[in-house]
Image (cartoon, rainbow, N blue to C red):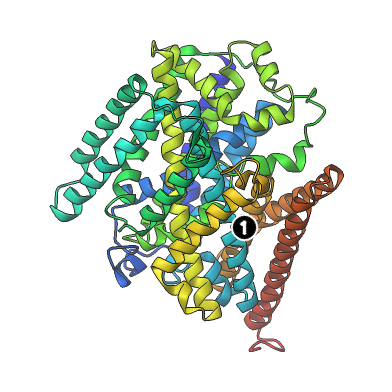
């Protein structure tokens, strides 16, 4: 048995024990989920955003929404430090950090009438913290939308075979939603038929690639695709969840799990050796330090603040029974861990030779700009070992990435609409409370960032601020953990399960942000310096607000002076 295969089996065993025992402990002893609790999906049922949903279907939405390109790109980049640190962080991070964080934010939202973690901050920490957190969340979502549109546009350009399969799946998903919710047909067989059609579309796409001209309406083809994807995201975010979001995400989750199964099977058949070292002592000169950058580079697949936004934004409004939060939240994070694990194996053992791996990771810039390429190359080699033609294999892998990036995009647009509405309520701006107005503003703000931030590269403006995403995302996770910690402490539960990850994440990401800012100063990237300092200051402010809230809560619990302040 080769070393990559042995490490994969060990990781899978640890994932099993993590879900079997630790998530059960969290559900029964810490969060104390109650099957009789009336969830927001029932309390505020409207058929658009609030809708009681089967836990398997909801898991499909939740997992598809959080499993964009990030759990592939981050681990594939992190292999530059060696496969050992990346693997260790993914496994331990998934079990003790991501699972608890995703489960916890979903539970906290359900217990607070489906409110987002930003709004919950008002009652747990204070009104100032709520306003600050909502602004940070809006910035994070703005980056996600603008950049994921670029990721999809680049994939459509690089892999034109993926264009038709992606767009053809949408009417199929909507037909399934109509049959299930309007005709009362059970979901299983329509979803299986939809999955078969999706794979058939891959062959159609491979035989009929869509090549766009270099410019469309005076802008580069990638810029055109960015507009199309942002417009699609805005429209999809306004559709009822049963019509597109749920059935499409359910089919996508089938596709990913079947895809993961095929990739893992390819790994078992190929039984490759590692091309990457366990710990790379000869990293390229431009590579940043392993600590703290590893814990920012690998976010999705270990812990990610964006997951908390999905859990408290869309998933909490569709949870049928509170105990389902364990499966949807914790196992959703586990699915990301499985994806990150195969990404590490593809990037560390999927290359044809050590020389090919060394060439790909010859510099930090090369590694960070080609994370998806490393995964596609390695995964393609795994599939080739099973006799799958290269064009079919690369189309299969690329459509996986496109499908989940697009799912993340329109879920993020829906979340951005929610956040704008919540900001409108916070500051009494009635226009922001309108669903149509908030959707239009979300769309226009993403387009503005995409096209105005970098006029020399229309559509790719989000990439200008993308270097700040990792730290902003992880600091958002830290702020969500503050809320969970204070809630557990207030209710007399074991808050250490949240406090330990909180301290680790806040320290590592604040350290990384500060280190990055100094690097931007040396490079003369003053726009990143200014925005980075603002984000770091806002997060420091929120941490101080959290500490102050903890002190007030301690006085309240002890009944000392100022207990009722």
Residue 321 percent across, percent down from the top left:
33, 61
Residue 187 drawn at (x, y percent): 21, 45
In the picture shown, does residue 533 fall above or below 523? Answer: below
Q: Nearer the viewer, residue 549 or 191?
A: 191
For the residue pair 130 and 209, the one nearer the viewer reads as 209
Q: Is residue 45 above or below residue 527?
A: below
Q: Position of residue 413 (x, y in %)?
A: 46, 55
Give the structural element (helix, strand or loop) at label 1. Answer: helix
Question: Is residue 226 toward the left or the right of residue 369 in the image?
Answer: left
Residue 442 appearing in the image = yes
Residue sitting at x 30%, y 36%: 168
Q: Which residue is mark 1?
A: 476
Q: Is residue 232 left or right of residue 1?
A: left
Q: Quadrant of residue 293?
A: top right
Residue closer to the observer: 208 or 40: 208
Identified at 71% across, 71% down, the residue is 547
Residue at x 40% of width, y 25% of height = 161
- Counting the numbered discs, the total is 1
Q: Position of residue 295 (x, y in %)?
A: 68, 43
Q: Residues within 10 Å of mark 1 (few under 14, many from 20)?
A: many
């Amino acid at each position: 048995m080769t070393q990559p295969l042995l490490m994969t089996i060990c990781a899978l065993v640890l994932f099993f024990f993590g879900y079997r025992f630790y998530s059960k402990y969290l559900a029964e002893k810490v969060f104390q989920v109650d099957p009789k609790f009336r969830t927001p999906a029932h309390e505020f049922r409207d058929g658009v955003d609030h809708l009681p949903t089967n836990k398997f279907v909801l898991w499909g939405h939740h997992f598809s929404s959080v499993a964009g390109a990030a759990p592939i790109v981050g681990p594939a980049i992190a292999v530059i430090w060696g496969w050992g640190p990346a693997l260790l962080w993914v496994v331990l991070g998934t079990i003790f950090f991501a699972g608890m964080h995703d489960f916890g934010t979903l539970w906290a939202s359900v217990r607070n009438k489906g409110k987002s973690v930003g709004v919950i901050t008002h009652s747990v920490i204070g009104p100032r913290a709520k306003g600050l957190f909502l602004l940070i969340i809006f910035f994070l979502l703005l980056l996600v939308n603008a950049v994921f549109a670029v990721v999809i546009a680049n994939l459509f350009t690089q892999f034109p075979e993926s264009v038709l399969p992606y767009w053809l799946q949408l009417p199929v998903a909507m037909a399934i939603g109509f049959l299930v919710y309007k005709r009362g047909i059970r979901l299983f067989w329509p979803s299986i038929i939809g999955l078969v059609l999706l794979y058939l579309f891959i062959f159609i796409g491979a035989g009929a690639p869509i090549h766009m001209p270099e410019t469309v309406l005076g802008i580069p083809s990638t810029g055109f695709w960015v507009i199309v994807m942002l417009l699609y995201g805005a429209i999809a975010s306004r559709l009822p969840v049963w019509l597109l979001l749920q059935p499409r995400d359910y089919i996508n989750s089938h596709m990913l799990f079947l895809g993961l199964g095929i990739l893992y099977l390819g790994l078992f058949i190929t039984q490759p050796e590692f091309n990457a070292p366990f710990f790379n002592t000869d990293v390229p000169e431009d590579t940043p330090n392993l600590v703290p950058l590893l814990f920012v580079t690998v976010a999705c697949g270990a812990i990610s603040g964006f997951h908390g936004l999905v859990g408290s934004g869309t998933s909490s409004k569709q949870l049928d029974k509170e105990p389902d939060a364990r499966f949807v939240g914790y196992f959703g994070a586990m699915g990301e861990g499985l994806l990150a694990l195969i990404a590490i194996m593809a990037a560390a053992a999927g290359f044809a030779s050590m020389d090919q791996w060394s060439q790909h990771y010859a510099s930090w810039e090369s590694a960070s700009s080609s994370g998806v390429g490393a995964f596609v190359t390695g995964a393609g080699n795994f599939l080739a070992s099973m006799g799958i033609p290269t064009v079919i294999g690369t189309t299969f892998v690329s459509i996986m990435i496109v499908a989940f990036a697009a799912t993340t995009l329109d879920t993020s647009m829906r979340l951005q609409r929610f956040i704008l509405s919540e900001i409108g309520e916070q500051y009494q701006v009635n226009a922001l409370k309108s669903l149509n107005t908030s959707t239009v503003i979300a769309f226009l703000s993403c387009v503005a960032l995409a096209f105005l931030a970098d006029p020399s590269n229309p559509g790719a403006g989000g990439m200008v601020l993308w270097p700040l995403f990792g730290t902003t995302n992880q600091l958002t996770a830290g702020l969500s953990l503050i809320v969970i910690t204070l809630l557990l402490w207030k209710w007399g539960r074991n808050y250490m399960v949240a406090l330990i990850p909180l301290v680790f994440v806040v320290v590592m990401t604040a350290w990384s942000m500060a280190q990055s800012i100094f690097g931007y100063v040396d490079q003369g990237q003053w726009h990143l310096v200014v925005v980075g300092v603002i984000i770091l200051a806002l997060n420091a402010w929120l941490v101080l607000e959290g500490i102050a809230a903890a002190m007030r809560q301690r006085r309240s619990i002890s009944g000392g002076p100022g207990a009722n302040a």
